[in-house]
Image (spheres, rainbow, N blue to C red):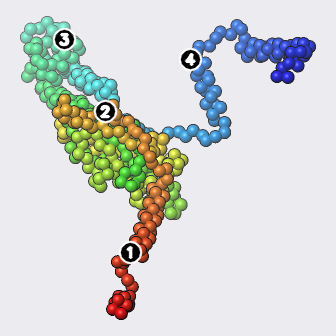
Amino acid sequence: MSCSRSFFRNPGRAGAANRQLSLAMQKFAVLLARKRPPDQPQQPRRLQQSKRAKRRDSWSRFRPGPARKLRRRAVLKSGECNVLQSRISRRSLRYLQDIFTTLVDSQWRWTLLCFALSFLLSWLVFAGLWWLIAFTHGDFEERHLRDEHWRPCVVELHSFASCFLFSIETQHTIGYGGRATTEECPEAIFVMCIQSISGVMIQAFMVGIVFAKMSRPKQRTQTLLFSRNAVICQRDGLLCLMFRVGDMRKSHIIGATVRAQLIRSRQSKEGELLAHSQHELRVGADGQAESSLFFIWPCSVVHKIDADSPLYNWSAEDMLAERFEIVVILEGTIESTGQTTQARSSYLPQELLWGHRFEPVVSYSKERQGYEVDYSLFDSTQQVDTPLCSGRELAEFYRLQDELRRQQQQQQQQQQNQTSPYSPTPPGAPDTIFFAFVT
């Protein structure tokens, strides 16, 4: 307070401070004018935001602290494998040798394009053959076209357009009744037989491709769900890794089995670095030993983190520091079609929720007289008390706790034996007590 009074009592001092403040404001205005000239148009807001984001990313590269890790996945959340193949020798030839699988695996636009081109090209090729047959026989000459007694190879052929129409009618057995082959040219009869056979083969091949593409069991995986996150919590005294699977359709998956693979880098005893080593995780539905599921409603698949688990030595902090991926696979037979389908997903360390548990989604509805599945709670979790130590440390803690409890029970039993009048006596004591009582 005294400083403020002295400041206001001295007007010269206050004026100097005001002059300094005005000079500073003028310098700041000059800097702003240099940075952005007045004739420069204002940039759009989206462009400014993108520039700010780039500037923030460039600052984050050089600022101190832990670097942000890129999320690398071998299997995407949609189930597709994130594997790019390159430098394959004679790749086009190998794909053309298995043209049926290539067309089935290709996108719909390429399949439909091949479907249309196969018919169009066959029509054009055989139309050219019919034109050559008629041209070599002289059916296109004017004197023969006017002669009513001339017998052509094919009746009513006047140009390439009519040959193209006859090719379509022959290949698809349309037969409008205007054009027809005669016995004048044996080569015409032979070409007609070849076109009829090839037309049936092309039609069967392309219809088979379209049918196989439409009936692929791959589309069935769109209604098979995996939980967005996996959780780690205690169950029956053990740390357990759990994720949830569900089926949205009424037609069930018969013989459903689930598997889990841990993909991480490790070093062998000989010093070899295995960049993408795979380790099988033993999983079961709701803690069962078998991996088969009675898949009528969403199930929680459990992996017990015991001594045989590769996660046995990892704590909550270690899992965030490690780089690994847990790939989960659900296989089974589709009840309606009898085909085998496979659904896949994966979980990264950032997608493992330590100390969480899935909320129940199955409840009995008295109004509808059946079990109701609420899929809005499919990914919902709730926090539970879970130790942050590893499975090994937790097992060691429980072992020491059991030993301590056993020692306490033994001590209590010894104290009770010493204080009880009917406690057993050591050898030789019964005789002494007997004689003492007789005397």
Spatial CA span between label 4 and label 2: 37 Å
Q: Amino acid at mark 3?
A: His
Q: Residue 156 sits in which quadrant? A: top left
- Is residue 391 among the parts visible in the rendering? yes
* Element marked by disc 4: helix
Badge 4 density bin: few <14, some 14–19, many ≥20, Cα 10 Å: few
- In the rendered image, the residue lying farthest to the front is 439
Badge 2 density bin: few <14, some 14–19, many ≥20, Cα 10 Å: some
Q: Amino acid at mark 4?
A: Arg
Q: Nearer the viewer, residue 335 or 124?
A: 335
* Element marked by disc 1: loop
318 in relation to 422, above or below: above
Identify the residue at image location x=29%, y=32%.
374
Question: Which is in the foreground here, disc 2 or disc 1?
Answer: 1
Q: Is residue 53 left or right of residue 101?
A: right
Q: Do the residues bearing badges 3 and 4 touch, measured as CB atoms within 8 Å?
A: no
Which residue lies under the disc numbered 2?
Answer: 375
Spatial CA span between label 1 and label 4: 87 Å
Q: Amino acid at mark 2?
A: Tyr
Query: In which quadrant is the C terminus drawn?
Result: bottom left
* Element marked by disc 2: helix
Q: Amino acid at mark 1?
A: Ser
Which residue lies under the disc numbered 3?
Answer: 158
Label 1 or label 4, whichever comes before in sequence order: 4
4 in relation to 207, above or below: above
Q: Residue 328 sits in which quadrant? A: top left
Q: Nearer the viewer, residue 316 or 345?
A: 316
Q: Is residue 309 left or right of residue 96?
A: right
Identify the residue at image location x=41%, y=48%.
233
